[in-house]
Image (cartoon, coloured by chain):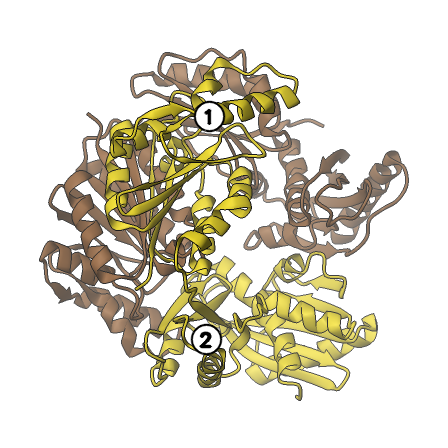
Chain colours: A brown, B yellow
Amino acid sequence: MNLIAEIFSQGAEIVTGQTVDSNAAWLSQQLTELGFSLKRHTAVGDDLPDLVDLFGEIARRADCCICTGGLGPTCDDLTAEAVSAASGVPLEFDAAAFAAIQAYYARRQRTMPEANRKQALLPAGALRIDNRFGTAPGFALQFERCWFVFLPGVPFEMKQMFDDWVRADLLQRFALRPDHLVTLRCIGLGESAIQEKLEPLALPPGAVLGFRAAPDEVQVKLLFPAEVPEAERRRVAAEAAARIGDYVFAVDGLPDVQGDLLAVVDAALNAGQYSLAVLETASHGLLAAKCLGRPWLQHAELRLNSAVAGAADAGEIRAEALANDLRAEQQTDFALVQLYAIDSGSFYDKDSGIVLYNALATPQGVVSRRLTAHGAGIHKQNQAALLALDLLRRYFQNSCL
Amino acid sequence: MNLIAEIFSQGAEIVTGQTVDSNAAWLSQQLTELGFSLKRHTAVGDDLPDLVDLFGEIARRADCCICTGGLGPTCDDLTAEAVSAASGVPLEFDAAAFAAIQAYYARRQRTMPEANRKQALLPAGALRIDNRFGTAPGFALQFERCWFVFLPGVPFEMKQMFDDWVRADLLQRFALRPDHLVTLRCIGLGESAIQEKLEPLALPPGAVLGFRAAPDEVQVKLLFPAEVPEAERRRVAAEAAARIGDYVFAVDGLPDVQGDLLAVVDAALNAGQYSLAVLETASHGLLAAKCLGRPWLQHAELRLNSAVAGAADAGEIRAEALANDLRAEQQTDFALVQLYAIDSGSFYDKDSGIVLYNALATPQGVVSRRLTAHGAGIHKQNQAALLALDLLRRYFQNSCL
């Protein structure tokens, strides 16, 4: 018998459609991976009677509910009050929560507005969940059948608190038999092309193959039932990776997490204590922006509105020459240069493609790669940044040129 | 008395988090603009008893519900069956719906799979809603208190069917009086500080004040009942804007939409056919990246790891000198320079603040502004990019230096 979980989102901005509720999807993925059976998402606005009714309904039908939003300092943040009204548990002033809110303002050398005092009122007996990145503490409590967890609606804070505390607490609190999820993370090949390559893949009984096209990558998800042993999971994942080829840049869940493309490149550059200089064009600053906080990026240059003309060979040769020059000039271990040409139409036309000429100067010589990017301008920009980083990833993972 | 509307989404991919439910947000915006009071979003998977329960609940508490998903040809598409079970209305074969499905395949010179026949089974007496772009017809029917509208989950088909028929039908069917939403968009001041400034604001009866902290701005939402005349809405919005001060960069809904900070800056630079050069440090490429596709950005430079030391005055003087130099060198109308100093600790430490020294060289001389940014590294980076743009916005909106 599976444990039933629900997701609940509070906020007028969600129920009136000002904000797309991406928190609900993220939390559902986490709970599904933990082994819960997800049954419902519900969102309501800032109306106290609606909130009270809803908490009462969920308390009777679910084993666990993760709730986001409504923990802020303003008059339309009603979550704690509604939980108290629904459950009959009074609100109590939590001195530790209040001290954390005061410390948040003190660190920023700002005076705490009086409104924030309200965020320290939690239902009596609730577990406080500290928020390292904002003023709103979360909390958790049992109400009838259901273990309720309340987190802020700001996605960054919510995810940190789930990762810091909630996931581990749920694993302790519930007898979960999580399925095993192995994710192959791919860049440079589309979802349907990857699906075709995987059609001959044989899966163990009960295992499920899924796909997810994220903005930065395509993920192939292999979900194995709890009883499939690790050796078998490794064998199937290796076969899938071999069929897809070197578009796979990371494999998560065996059991390590390798992370996204930047994490893979970061690990390789840090391991060798290497330095990098970049010259970007089509990515328009986004390549450098993505590398915030990476000490290996020692120099970044931007050339705006600089599409190259002429034959493809000329584009690659020019990129290679610039990469060699940049490496010599900046005295870095690596230099990455991105040039591009417009296929037809304009960069910002979603029906026009661009051709990217990426070149990487290394201690062993220069390599280059010609690629294409499509879609809206911001999509091409993002692809250009990622595909430049991917040339570094390929250099390190394929070990030789 | 407002009419109550809900949004319901069916599909395992939504409830397990594989897909973010953007349909719910889009439909909520449409219904809010029509004058419905949106009360709930609910999503459930492909479970018949869950669906039957849910339709029964909604039928008793809402005046209108738009439902998406579950209209496909496969065994997990259970919407019509669940509606029939909940309402007691039998399914009937709809010959016109079937002819439309057959025509869809005929136009594509493909054979209709037998499974698609099921899509022509609609609750007896329901209104059929034709789908010009896919095989799944929609339908609508009254069940207890609620007018239910069923549309496919494919966003493109759903939106076309709403625009083609549903909106006009709702306007005829219900006596709607749309509310008026005015949004004040602010940057540089936090949500609770803004709330404090607005505490003395007197609102007309029935008007509601709300707040939304988005990553790039804080929004103050003034929701006025339909009967409040435009002159009164303008007066209240102007008073709120005056209380907040020049942190307000745009006012949407009077009735024009001015857009986000970049849109406001973009409009001002385009109106004067001005050109801009930027030198960015703390924003690490993100300022240029945000300006993708804006022809006024003619030059962008990056200085990585370049925190300045020394007294605040020195930082401002240095930024102003660099801005004048950059403007002269690049021969642009404006030059924007961003320098920063680290308060204590490191840029990437969420508890350390940075001081930003932004300077703008203009045809009338140079201005500068000292600001602070806090939070995680990527939050400081984003604030640094936005606050630099905000100096341009302030130049244009405040007209004089």
Q: Residue furthest bottom?
A: B400
* Residue located beneath label 1 in the image: A210
Which quadrant of the rendered structure holds the N terminus of chain A?
top left
- Asked if B30 appears above or below B287 in the picture, the reply is above
* Residue located beneath label 2 in the image: B189
Indicate the secondary structure of the residue bearing disc 1: strand
Which quadrant of the rendered structure holds the C terminus of chain A?
top right
Is disc 2 surrounded by few (<14), some (14 to 19) or many (20+) residues within 10 Å?
few
- Asked if B240 appears above or below B90 in the picture, the reply is below
Question: Quarter-wise, where is residue A6 in the image?
Answer: top left
- Tell me if residue B353 can be seen: no
**Residue A321: x, y in percent?**
84, 42
Chain of the residue that carries numbered disc 1 in the rendered image: A
Residue under the point 58% across and 33% down: B133
Check disc 2 and give the amino acid type: Leu
Check disc 1 and give the amino acid type: Gly
**Residue A322: x, y in percent?**
82, 46
Indicate the secondary structure of the residue bearing disc 2: loop
Give the side of residue B170 with respect to residue A270, left or right: left
**Mark seen at residue A200:** none
Residue under the point 46% across and 25% down: A210
